[in-house]
Image (cartoon, rainbow, N blue to C red):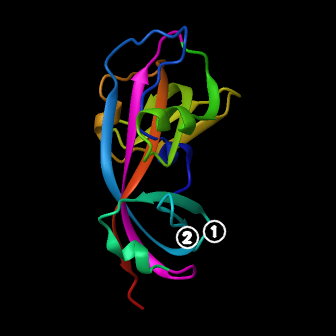
Amino acid sequence: MPGFVALLIVGLLSPGGTEQSGPPNAVVRESTTTSTVDRIERSSRLLTLRSKDNVFQTVHVDTDITAFDDLRVGDVVTVRYTESVIVAVRSNATLSPTQDTTAEARKEDEQVVEQLKRVVTIDNIDSQGLFVTYRTHDDRKMLHHVRDKALLEGIRPGDRVEITVTRARAVSIERARR
């Protein structure tokens, strides 16, 4: 999944010196990808997938998903996995580039595969709440599709927000039908 927001992971870790201006908005959802198995780490049960567009993604596979044991590099599979996004207004936060906070998140939940965090300034939210325009730390203006309007509740243009995306574990794995 290209795009920063699609990569953010669960685990809201407040950076020092910032003040939260309101409760965070959080969405946990299941996503699905059909990709080629690129790497299998059996001891840690991590599965790295490669999409048709050569985008790599890693998911943790719980021990109750027995299909993992039969996978081979090169298999084409459909994987359902959970991911979460948290958006919190941080009025005093400093704009920041994307930061990989995976190591910190794993201290609280070892099954976190990836966590990314970024602080941006909201420029505009379209009237249906389907798109948001924001400015990055280097003053780039970005447009992003919002899958769940709940992430934007109470957020207004001019707000500085911290976005945290966490990708966690696979829910199911099936060999893709050819």
Q: How far is the residue under mark 1 from the one under mark 2?
A: 5 Å
Q: 169 left or right of 51? A: left
Question: Crowding near pointer 1: few (<14 within 10 Å), some, many (20+)?
Answer: few
Q: Would you say residue 128 is visible in this rendering? A: no
Q: Would you say residue 161 is visible in this rendering? A: yes
Which of the numbered marks, if any, corresponds to residue 81? none
Taking the spot 56% from the left edge, 55% from the top edge, the residue there is 2
Q: Position of residue 134 (x, y in %)?
A: 54, 31
Taking the spot 42% from the left edge, 33% from the top edge, the residue there is 108
Give the labeled residue for mark 1.
Answer: 54
- Magenta segment main secondary structure: strand
Give the labeled residue for mark 2.
Answer: 51
Disc 1 to disc 2: CB gap under 8 Å = yes
Amino acid type, mark 2: Ser
Q: Position of residue 33 (x, y in %)?
A: 43, 67
Q: Residue 46 lies in magenta, yes or no?
A: no
Query: In the image shown, does 98 or 150 lie closer to the viewer?
Result: 98
Q: Is 42 placed above or below 15 here?
A: below
Amino acid type, mark 1: Asn
Magenta residue span:
72-92
Query: In the image shown, does 44 or 60 lie closer to the viewer?
Result: 44
SS for callout 2: loop
Q: Position of residue 70 (x, y in %)?
A: 43, 81
Q: Position of residue 96 (x, y in %)?
A: 63, 25
